[in-house]
Image: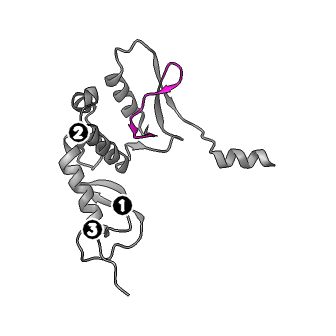
Amino acid sequence: MEKRLCYRCKQNSPGKYEDISFTYLGMTVKISKDGLTCEECAKELWVQDFEGKVKEFIKISKSGKPTVNWPHYQDFFSESRFSDRKERFHHILMTLGILSFQPEGNWEIVADGRVGLNPRAFLSYFYFVNKKDAIEFASLQFPNTLYGWEIHLISEVIEKKELLKGLKK
């Protein structure tokens, strides 16, 4: 039987798909590693993305806490420019715990008519983990809109399977 090797380095075993954590520049990073790449190559790919595409948007405190330079984000990504780079940036923010796909316990910006204004990833919707980021993002993105908007903390989410299970009883 042939031993599978990492598609990138061709040396290490790729292992299985898993979530891994590591520290970079004092920040805790959580990424999903696929089953084709070894752990070291997965980390290197993340670092390359961070250094090459998003480092200019993130300030790192001496304690390793990342904060987003939202004004720079606003200037750089205005008018739907660089959409592929914007997607990578949002992904990096998710790995740093600034954005999340999970609504419960996180913040969203909502316009009149309950239209969500948070950043999106293709068809998915991101939520802000911190209130401060939601406020800064909204105040930069939507200060002169003709419609109203609010920032909400989502306190409870009922998933489809939980809801349907309750109806069957």
Q: Dividing the picture into quarters, in which one does residue 48 lie?
A: bottom left
Identify the magenta region: 111-125
Query: Which mark is in front, 1 or 3?
Result: 3
The residue indicated by pointer 3 is 40
Q: Residue under circle 1?
A: 21
In front: 125, or 68? 125
Q: How is the image coloured?
A: one colour
Residue 116 covered by magenta stretch: yes
Of labels 2 and 3, earlier in sequence is 3
CA–CA distance in space, label 2 to label 1: 22 Å
Q: Earlier in the sequence, mark 2 or mark 1?
A: 1
Q: Is residue 41 above or below residue 80?
A: below
Mark 3 Cα-neighbour bin, 10 Å: few <14, some 14–19, many ≥20: few
Residue found farthest to the bottom: 1
Q: Amino acid at mark 3?
A: Glu
Q: CA distance from mark 1 to mark 3?
A: 11 Å
Q: Secondary structure at mark 2?
A: helix
x then y, percent, for residue 113: 53, 20
Residue type at numbered disc 1? Ser
Decide: is 108 above or below 32. Answer: above
Q: On the picture, is 18 further left or further right than 60?
A: right
Residue at numbered disc 2:
57
